[in-house]
Every structure is written in C-alpha cells, then in structure tokens.
Amino acid sequence: MPADVSNFRTSDEVAYDRTRLRQWREGRAGADGVSRRAMLGLLAAAGSAATVPLTAPARAVAAEPTIRKPLPPEWFVPRGTNAETRFEALRGTGRTTPNERFFVRNHTFTPVLDAGEWRLKVWGSGLRGRRGEDRPLEFGYDDLRRLPSTTRTAFVECAGNGRSFYASQQGETVTGTSWTLGAIGVARWRGVRLGDVLRRAGATRYALDVQPRGLDADFLTNGENLGRVRRPLPLAKALDDVLLAYEMNGEPLPADHGYPVRVVVPSWIGISSVKWVGDLEVSEEPLYSPWNTTLYRLFGPAHPPEGSAPLTRQTLKSAFEVASGATFPQGVRTRLHGRSWSGAGAVVKVEVSTDGGERWRRARLHDVPRADVWTRWSLDWRPGARGPATLLARATDARGRTQPAASVPNTQGYFFDAVVRHPVTVV
Ligand SMILES: Nc1nc2c(c(=O)[nH]1)N[C@H]1C(S)=C(S)[C@@H](COP(=O)(O)O)O[C@H]1N2
Ligand SMILES: [Mo]
C-alpha cells in the first residue's frame, strides 16, 4: 500500500471499524438512514452478513439551496449549494479567515434559527438513566454561555478540498463538488468543551460514540433521503479537543456557519464539524450514518472493497494567494505568498518551484508553525522568459510528511494531497 494512504488506516482505526461492523451485524449498533445494501457492502470483507435490520423508508422533503451571506465574485466561486473561497482573496488578511470570506459547504440550505428557542438535546443509551430521544436532557443557549468557555484556533476543511485536481492533474474521474483549494478556512472558535457538556449530561463510562445532528433539512441525493446531517465521533475524540462553538473570530456564529451553535472538531475533516447542532446522541453502541459508511471513506482500486476506515484527520496541502492564470511582468521582482496546512501537525517547511518543478527553493515562513492552523509563507520571484509558467508549492509537516507528486485516487475524490500545478503567464 502506498505510504500516503497507510497514514489513514492505522491498525487502531481498522480494528475499531471491524469491531463496530460486527456489532452492527449482531444488531448491537445503530445505523438509521444507512441503506442495508451499504452496510452489507462494508461487511463484505469482514465476514458473513447473517440477518440484518432494514432501514426506515425515505421521506420526501423539499430542499432549496441558499447561502445567506453576500458572495461577491472577487471572494467566492459559487459551487451549487456551496461557495468556495478564492485564495487570492486572502492576500493581506491575517492568519484567520475573515467570516465574510469563509467558504460555505451546505448539503441543503442555511436555516435561520432563533437562539432563544434553540435547544441542544442530549439523549441515548450512553447516559445515566438511558434517556430516549423523546426524553432528552436539554441545554438552552444561555445555559451553554454560562458554562466555562474556551477558545481555539483551528481550520475547518472539506474532505473533498482539491478534488478537481484528480481530474485536471491525474485524469481520474471522481464524484462530488469540483473544489480547487478554497474549501478551507481558519477561525478562532469560542465555545464550550463538548466533554464538559457530556459530563454534565451524565455520560457513562460505557459511552462509546457521540453523534451530533444538524437542524438543517433532510439531505436528498440520488433519489434517497439520507435524513439530517449527522456523523458519529468516538468518545475519545469528543472528550479531547472538540468544541460546541458559539463564536467565530469574536462574533456570534454567522447563520451560514452554524448559528447559534456548531461542533468544531480540530484537525478532522469538515463533515465532523456539524453546524446548527440540535441534538447529541450518546451511545453505548457504535453508531453509523451515511456520513461514515458510504460517504467519507476511501473506495477504489487502492483501497479495500469495503472502503477504508472512516476518514478522520485531514491531509496536507498548499495554496498560493494568486489567481489561477494571473499575469506577472517579465523581469520585475515580485513576492509570491501562500499558505500550507496539515491535519497531522504544524507545517514546518515549504518549498516553492517557479519553473514547473525543476528547481525548488525554501519559502520564508511568516508564522510560528502550529497544529490545526495554516502557516503563511512567501518567496521572491523575478519572472524570466515570457509565456506560460507553472508555480508549485510543497509542504512538510511536523510529522515529517511531505506532499507527494501524485495522490492515490479514490472514487469520491477525497484527500487530494499532491502538489498542485498553478498556471500563470509571464508577460
Ligand atoms: N448541519 C450541517 N453541518 C455541516 C454541513 C451541513 O451541510 N449541515 N456540512 C459539513 C461539511 S461537508 C463541511 S466541509 C463543513 C463546512 O463548514 P462551513 O460551511 O462553516 O465552512 O460543515 C459541515 N457541517
Ligand atoms: Mo465537507
């Protein structure tokens, strides 16, 4: 197996996944809204399927794609229900992304919620008293704001960020939104530790998974209703560094980013950071949703037939704060700026090539490298011959991992980590 996919298939994750699949087969795990076919697919390599429960029939719900904030074309590229940040729009901004320029990834549309009426319902078999969904423990917005708060700077990045390069650089056909590199933003999140809420809610020591669920509309895709956006987190991660955030860069969360409260899961793929969170299921049994079974695993020739373990930590990427196809005058010294980030730790080194990858130079780092945040960098360049040129940037993180020349493909185009070829013209 190539080194860069083995990172995401640590033996721990694989063993964990296998145990959970066995529990599902034995009727000891929840998988509402995951088709029986999908679960059987996952089980294929894990052993016999035996008898398995059927899922509820799909309900039809109207979906109307909407983002509430303005999306000026100099800052965003519209992508269906989503909006991608242009990296050139980050030039001159700080280490955090201004809320107005932060990318939006919506499965359906932004709901407009009232913090006064909002409740976080905590329920499930992993709570003392084994609370059913109809008998949850509730926290209001003011209850959360009265709990001790904590602040953390972290990126939220879609697992599919960079997906379009599987096609444009590697000739691979993959499904999903054709992001370039702008499905990422960094913000200072303030909120309550999820662990504090779970302890107050009476999570038992047998609790295994926590599944936050959004209050946005059911997600309909390919004629199926997958229900509301939800994805389980193992309790170990939930108790570690996960926040229930109500502030983003010092302001109340904007509607598009989860107002009044969202989950923020540092270093993990964006789907973990559920927006508009309405309830948390705390379970003694492993939980499944479409977002950790058919979606957000790696499928394809380089991966096991049942797919990889569910994706967790983000991979490694770099981007120039330069428009694609930008022009540079010949012979005039210019300063190229960019940012690099990794889910595995701080970015400690960035190399840049201005000649299509022949010669590499060390970029100057502008930030103290930190985990969960990008490192800004720059490099001076005096463009030579007129005509097309290709800029490349290659990051190395604190774990010693460097961006490869090509990414191992997967059918849904997640985790593009290869060096991106950035076209410009010298005039
Ligand atoms: N409730 C809910 N949470 C969600 C989503 C969603 O559609 N609904 N999208 C997820 C995905 S796929 C990503 S990448 C991030 C994007 O966060 P942002 O829109 O604040 O940038 O939110 C995640 N949380
Ligand atoms: Mo995402």
Image: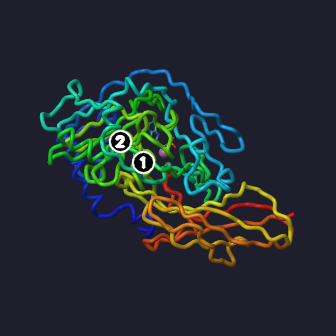
Say which residue label 1 marks: 296
* Residue 247 position (above or below residue 392): above
> Mark 2 or 1, which is nearer the eye?
2
Question: Image point 37% across, 39% down: which residue?
Answer: 290
Q: Which mark is residue 35?
A: none
Left or right, 402 with reference to 420 = left
Q: Earlier in the sequence, mark 2 or mark 1?
A: 2
Question: Image point 62% across, 67% down: which residue?
Answer: 377
Q: Circle 1: is it few (<14), some (14-19), or many (20+) Cα within 10 Å?
A: many
Could you say which is closer to the camera, residue 403 or residue 3? Answer: 403
Q: Circle 2: is it few (<14), some (14-19), or many (20+) Cα within 10 Å?
A: many
The percent coordinates of residue 74 (x first, y second) are 72, 44
Say which residue label 2 marks: 231
The percent coordinates of residue 225 (x first, y second) are 41, 28
Pointer 2 and pointer 1: residues touching (CB < 8 Å)?
Answer: yes
The residue type indicated by label 2 comes to Arg
The residue type indicated by label 1 comes to Tyr
Q: Is mark 1 within 8 Å of ligand 2?
A: no
Quadrant where the C terminus sits is: bottom right
Question: Image point 43% across, 65% down: which residue?
Answer: 345
* Residue 1 position (above or below residue 230): below
Left or right, 427 with reference to 59 = right
Could you say which is closer to the camera, residue 275 or residue 229? Answer: 275
Q: How far is mark 2 from mark 1, CA to CA?
A: 10 Å
Left or right, 29 with reference to 112 = left
Could you say which is closer to the camera, residue 144 or residue 63? Answer: 144
Secondary structure at badge 2 equals loop
